[in-house]
Amino acid sequence: MDSLTYVYVWDPCEIIYLGFYSDNNSNCVLDGGDTWIYSGPAVVRVDSAGVPVDTLTSPWGLYYAAHGVAGTVYTFTVITNPLGFMPTCPTSGIATVTIASTYGYSTAEIGFQCDPSACLDNAVHGNFRAAITGARSYLQLTTSRCTAGTETATVTFSPKYTVASVDGASSYTVSGKVATINVSGLSATNPIWVYIYYSPVGTLTLGDTAKTTVTIPTTGDCATGNNTIVSIDTLRSSYDPNHKSALPVATITPGGRLEYMLQFENTGNDTAHNIHLIDTLSDNLDINTIKVTGGSAPCKMYLSTWAGHNVVTFDFPGINLLDSSHHGLCDGFVLFTINAKTSITPGTNIDNRAGIYFDANAVVMTNGVRNTVPVTSGVANINNNVVEIYPNPVNDKLMVNADSKAFGSMTISNTLGQVVIAQQVSNNVNEVNVKSLPSGIYYVTLRGTGGVKVVKFEKL
């Protein structure tokens, strides 16, 4: 009566784990005497049957889905060493895996040892969480230096807070609104985590912002781009330790690089054995540029799509994160960078938030972060009900976009209601020089036939 032809094509594959470790005991075996590499990521070229198919970046290793018929050889070649390290097991920095005849799981490792001839690179990563009840800075300090030594970080914090305590530092001092944090034992194989806890000064206001700046010395440093972080957070009733932050803050240029930090904390009363983070990325980001650059523990990164959107998943299997009674030992994070698409236009927003899963518990959603491409000339879609200001926070020049037919005057007031700047609205794009204003919260007020509009901004 009928016939049916069914064709099934089997694509053999293996999940390959390639691990990068510091061979501390020089035996070329990943064992208890060795450590993972945290000072910086390695860049690896992936070849399938001699043909380059991928270039990946990771500090401690990577998981790769390899496809091909049985016998296909995958080659992983380190083309950029983790800063401060050189491959020794093998010295070529090349690992190979041959696809088996069935679905499988293979491992390969490349051992490194600290390179005393490498240039010095100190780095700091972290974020700042603010609330009306208190605040916290979470910092990771790394170095490419082979021998353990002492390093100093300088933290300039908001006048809204005072330092209450510091965990992880060998010593610290506070002078005015500057904390000097000293850490000992810092080396390429031993990163240091520091927690700074702040108490509020007086009664703080919900919705205000607070800023911290952290720097480590740059003298003799060959990569000073990672020596300073500036964090700005909005004051909430309490801060959530499960958090997402982005650098740079607020703005982004077409093709510009974003560094995202996903931070998580076990706030429960039992060990969190397995943790995974799921992050649905903005369609305005170039998925081909994603790179894992650091973290508190080795993790697996997977890329997938859902409903047409790019999704990155970070798995921490067997992390065994201690419960909340272990102060300073129940936190973790992952860092990754990704570039904005070069085709995005002024006014485009890049929004992001992530979900965090602790074992079988319900998802914990992070806050949302937004980066916007500034409008540099002209004003799109301006009407009597639209007022835009940028950048926010601002250092020197504040741009105010408003319909000059709807608004005739503009003032800037401080939190006491005192007018500190007044000028006319003469164009749809108005430049205001705020460089001389003290750091703090201010309000732009526009008046005219379009009514009264008030917009808040922060002066850094």
Image (spheres, grey):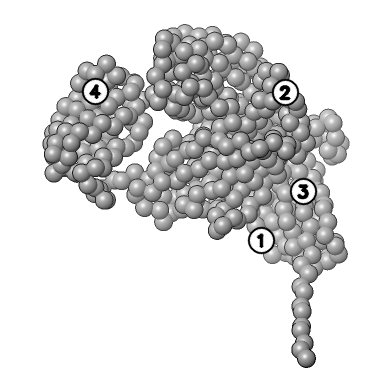
Give the mark, 2 or 4, whose residue is nearer the N terminus.
Answer: 2
Give the mark, 4 or 1, whose residue is nearer the N terminus.
Answer: 1
Residue 385 coordinates in the image, percent (x, y): 24, 42
Residue 413, numbered label: 4
Give the mark, 2 or 1, whose residue is nearer the N terminus.
Answer: 1
Q: Identify the residue shown where x is 22% and y is 41%.
A: 402
Q: Quadrant of the C terminus?
A: top left
Residue 38 vertical position relative to residue 344 in the rendered view, above or below: above
| Corner quadrant of residue 444 | top left
Residue 17, numbered label: 3
* Residue situated in front as seen by the camera: 41 or 439: 439
* Residue situated in front as seen by the camera: 27 or 373: 373
Residue 5 coordinates in the image, percent (x, y): 76, 83
Alpha-carbon span between mark 2 and mark 4: 47 Å
Q: Secondary structure at mark 1?
A: strand
Residue 43 vertical position relative to residue 249 in the rendered view, above or below: below
**Which residue in the structure is indicated by mark 1?**
53
Q: Amino acid at mark 4?
A: Ser
**Which residue in the structure is indicated by mark 2?**
269
Give the mark, 4 or 3, whose residue is nearer the N terminus.
Answer: 3
Q: Identify the residue shown where x is 41% and y is 12%.
A: 203
Q: Amino acid at mark 1?
A: Val
Alpha-carbon span between mark 3 and mark 2: 32 Å
